Structures are given as structure tokens and as C-alpha cells.
Amino acid sequence: MAGRKTLRVTQVRSGIGRPQDQRATLAGLGLNKLQRTRELEDTPAVRGMINKIRHLVRVEDQ
């Protein structure tokens, strides 16, 4: 991913008790346990998914 911008996304709150679509979004980003971190490409699709679950994750620019 030379030259491509990435985002570091960390799950900081549980998906338990959340609507099914929010749990599916967490899984789609590869997050399923607290404190799990993924480096994802900064695309509009990923930004939209993060926006949907912004109360459950922490995002850092790379």
C-alpha cells in the first residue's frame, strides 16, 4: 500500500446489545473483540462504515 493513506481503527466498546446492522458493520471491518485493531485503507466506503459505528471505535490517521 505504498502511498495510500490508511486508518487505524480500534474497537473500544462492545457490540453486545447493539442492532444487528451495527454488529455486522463491526464484523465487516474485521473487528469482533475489544481492543482489536485493524489498519484499513481510507476509502469512502470504509469512512461510511466507521461513521455508522463511530460510538464503538477509535480512529487514528496514519
Image: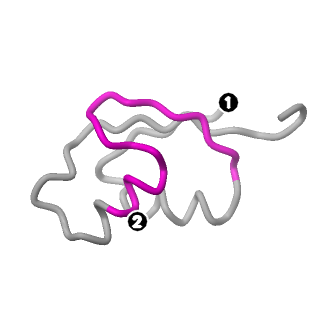
Q: Nearer the viewer, residue 43 or 61?
A: 43
Looking at the picture, which amino acid does disc 2 mark? Lys
Up the image or down, 36 lies above or below 59; here it is: above
How far across and how far down the image is residue 53, in percent?
Answer: 36, 58
Q: Is 41 on the left-hand or right-hand side of 35?
A: right
Q: Secondary structure at mark 1?
A: loop
Q: Secondary structure at mark 2?
A: helix
Looking at the figure, which quarter contains the N terminus?
Answer: top right
Q: Residue at x 32, y 28 (%)?
A: 35
Within the magenta stretch, is there residue 34?
Answer: yes
Q: Residue at x 28, y 36 (%)?
A: 33
Within the magenta stretch, is there residue 51?
Answer: no
Report the Cα–Cα distance between label 1 and label 2. Answer: 21 Å
Looking at the figure, which quarter contains the C terminus?
Answer: top right
Identify the image quadrant of residue 22.
Answer: bottom left
Q: Residue at x 59, y 34 (%)?
A: 39
Q: Residue furthest left?
A: 17
Identify the image quadrant of residue 10.
Answer: top left
Residue interval drawn in magenta: 24-42
Which residue is disc 1 drawn over?
A: 62
Neighbours of disc 1 within 10 Å: few (<14), some (14-19), many (20+): few
Up the image or down, 50 lies above or below 36; here it is: below
User: Which mark is drawn over residue 52?
Assistant: 2
Question: Which tag, 1 or 2, sits closer to the chain's start?
Answer: 2
User: Which mark is drawn over residue 31?
Assistant: none
Q: Residue at x 45, y 30 (%)?
A: 37
